[in-house]
Amino acid sequence: MTATAGRPILEAEGVARQFGRFVALGGVDLALEAGEKRALIGPNGAGKSTFINVVGGQLAASAGTIRLDGRDVTGLQPHQLARSGLGRTFQISRTYRQMSVRENLVAAYLVARGHGYSLSRGRLRALAAEAEALLERVGIAGLAERPADDISHGDRKRLEFAMVLAGEPRLLLLDEPTAGMGLKERHELMDLVAEEASGRGLTLLFVEHDIDVVFRIADRITVMARGQVFAEGTADEIAADREVQRIYLGEGH
Amino acid sequence: MSAARIDWRIVAAGCLAVLAAIALGGRGGAPLVTEMLLMALFASSLNLLMSYGGMVSFGHAAFFGLGAYGLALAVSRFGLPVAAGLACGPLLAGLLALVFGTLCVRLSHIYFAMLTLACGQITFTVLFQWYDFTGGDTGITGFMAPAFGLDERWFAVVVLGVVVACLLALWRVVNAPLGITIRSVGEDPERVSASGLNPRRVQLTAFVIAGTLAGVAGSLFAALQGNAFPDYAGLGFTLDSLIMVVLGGLRSFGGGLYGAVIYVLLRNYVPLLVTEWELVIGVILLLVVLWSPEGFAGGLQRIGRRLRSEPRP
Ligand SMILES: Nc1ncnc2c1ncn2[C@@H]1O[C@H](COP(=O)(O)OP(=O)(O)OP(=O)(O)O)[C@@H](O)[C@H]1O
Ligand SMILES: [Mg+2]
C-alpha cells in the first residue's frame, strides 16, 4: 500500500547521536509517508532504539533535524512531542507497576484528554468504561484488576500498546512490541497492531526482529547497521538485496 | 491503595475515639492528642510525596516551620489578627513550596532529596539568623495566648476539625484524576512524559499541596504553643516526619496517621521507662524496616488478609 503522496509525516535528516566518543547514530535520514507501516530492522546494537529515543525526545540528537508534519521539532521534550501526535512504546515496556492494569490505562486516558490535574472523580468513572473496551480490544480485559507488576511480559506489552492507543497518536513508534513473546502471540499482537494502525489511519514505525512478521506487516523496510541506514525499500526489494542478506538475514535472525 | 470511597463509619469512629481521648484523657490528654493530630497532618503531607509521588524529601519541616512563622510574623510584625495569621502560615508555606519545589523537581532521586535538604537548611538558617525579623534563635513568643486562650480541650476539638478536613481533602486529591497522575509520576516519570504530560509540573503540584498542608500543621502548632522557634523548620522535625511515615506505612494513605499516633505515644511514654529514647526508636525502626517494610499499615493489611485467609498477592 502506498500512502497518499504529500508531505511525509516524519522526516529525520542527518540525525546523529554520540555516547561519549561512541557514534551510536551517524547521520540517519528517514522519512515516513502518512499512513505507511514501516519496519526498522537491523542487528543488535545497530542504533534502532537510539533512533526511536531521539525521535521520541527521550534522547537529544547530537546533530540533525527532525520534522513532524513539516514542523521542526528537534529538541522538544517528550511530552511536547506526545502532544503533537507522537505515541511510543519502549523496548523494555514501561508501565506503572504498582498500579492495576485498569488504572494504568485510565492514567493514559487522563493525560490524553487533558484531565491529568482534574479533581473530579466522575471523570474516572467515565474513563473506566472506555478503558474496559480498549483492554478488551488488546485482549487483557480479564487482567484489569491485577497490578501491572503481576502480569506476563507479553501482557505488559499489550498494556503499553493500549496506553499508547489511548493517546490517539497519529504517529506510532513501537520498539520491539513483541520482544519476549512466543511465535503465536507475536503474530496475533502484530496483526492487531496492523489492524489498529489501518483502522485509525496511523503511521507506524516498528522495530522487530522476527523477519516473517516484518514481511507480513510492513509496507516498507529500513535496514540499519552500525548507526547508519543501510538499505531501504519494499519487502520484495529488501528480500532480494544480497548485501542485506549478508549482514542481516544471513546472520540467523 | 485503590478503594476510592470514604468509609464514613471509620471517619466517625476515629473522630469519636479522639473526642473520647480528649474528654477522658485527664490533664495531659488534650495536649497529647493535639500534638498527635498535628503530627498526623504533617506526616500525611510528607506521605503524599513519599507514598504517592515517589519523592523523598529531607527538608519537609521547612514548610511546617514556615507555617508557624507565617502566623507568628503576621501577628507580631504586621499586626494582623490571629485569625488572619492562621491563613498566612499555610500561604507562606505553600508559596515557598512553589519556589523550592521549582528548584528541587529539576532533579530526581537522591539529588532531589539533597536539594530538599539544602532548601530546608536554608530556611532554618534564615529563621535562626535573621534576628531583626524572625527573632533569631530566641524565636517569636508572646504574640498570642497559647491555644487562643481556649481551654486545652476545646483547642484540641478545633484542631481535630481542621485536621480531619485537611485529611479528607488530601484523600480527595489522591483518589481523583490528579492522584492517579501523581502516582503514575511516582512510578515512571518517563512513561508519563511519553504520554504527553510534563512530570515535573505534576511533582511540583504535589510538592505545593504537601508544603501547604505541612504549613497548616505548623501554624496550628505555633498557635498551640503560642510561639515559633527555628527548630520547627529544623532537621529534627524533618526526621520526625520521615520516621512517622516509615513507621506508619509507605504505600498507604493512613501511613502518616498511624505513624504519628505510634510515634507520639512512644516519644511520650518510652522516656518514662528508659532514658535511651533514641536507642528504642532506632531499634523499632530497624525492626519495622526489616520485617514489615510497609510499616504498621502493611502489617494490618497482612493480618487482615490472613484472617480472610486470602492468598498473598
Ligand atoms: N545510554 C547509552 N550509553 C552508551 N552507549 C549506549 C547507550 N545507549 C545505547 N548505547 C550503544 O549504542 C549502540 C546502539 O544501541 P541501540 O540500543 O540503539 O541498538 P538497537 O539497534 O536498538 O539494538 P537491539 O536490537 O539490541 O535493541 C549500542 O552499541 C549500545 O551499546
Ligand atoms: Mg533496541
Image: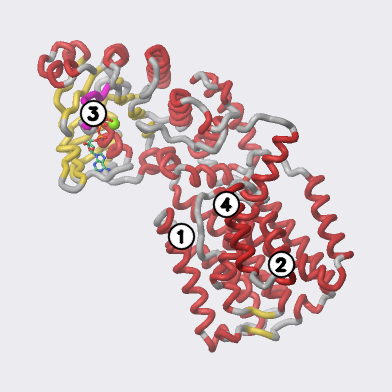
Which is nearer the N-term, disc 4 or disc 2?
Answer: 2
Q: Looking at mark 2, is its residue's CB closer than 8 Å to ligand 1?
A: no
> Callout 3: few (<14), some (14-19), or many (20+) C-alpha neighbours within 10 Å?
few
Mark seen at residue B270: 2
**Label 1 amino acid?**
Ala
Which is nearer the N-term, disc 4 or disc 1?
Answer: 1
Q: Residue B184: percent from the left, percent from the top?
A: 51, 42
Residue drawn where x is 44% and y is 57% of the image: B105
Residue B313 higher or lower than B100, as above or below: above
Residue to which mark 1 is pinned:
B113
Q: Looking at mark 1, is its residue's CB closer than 8 Å to ligand 1?
A: no
Residue A88 higher or lower than A37, as above or below: below
**Label 3 amino acid?**
Asn
Chain at numbered mark 1:
B
Occupied quadrant, residue A6: top left
**Label 4 amino acid?**
Val
Residue drawn where x is 14% and y is 19% of the image: A244
Q: Label 3 vs label 2: CA separation?
A: 61 Å
Residue A120 higher or lower than A191, as above or below: below
Q: Residue B281: percent from the left, percent from the top?
A: 63, 63
Mark seen at residue A44: 3
- Ligand number 2: quarter of image: top left
Total numbered circles: 4
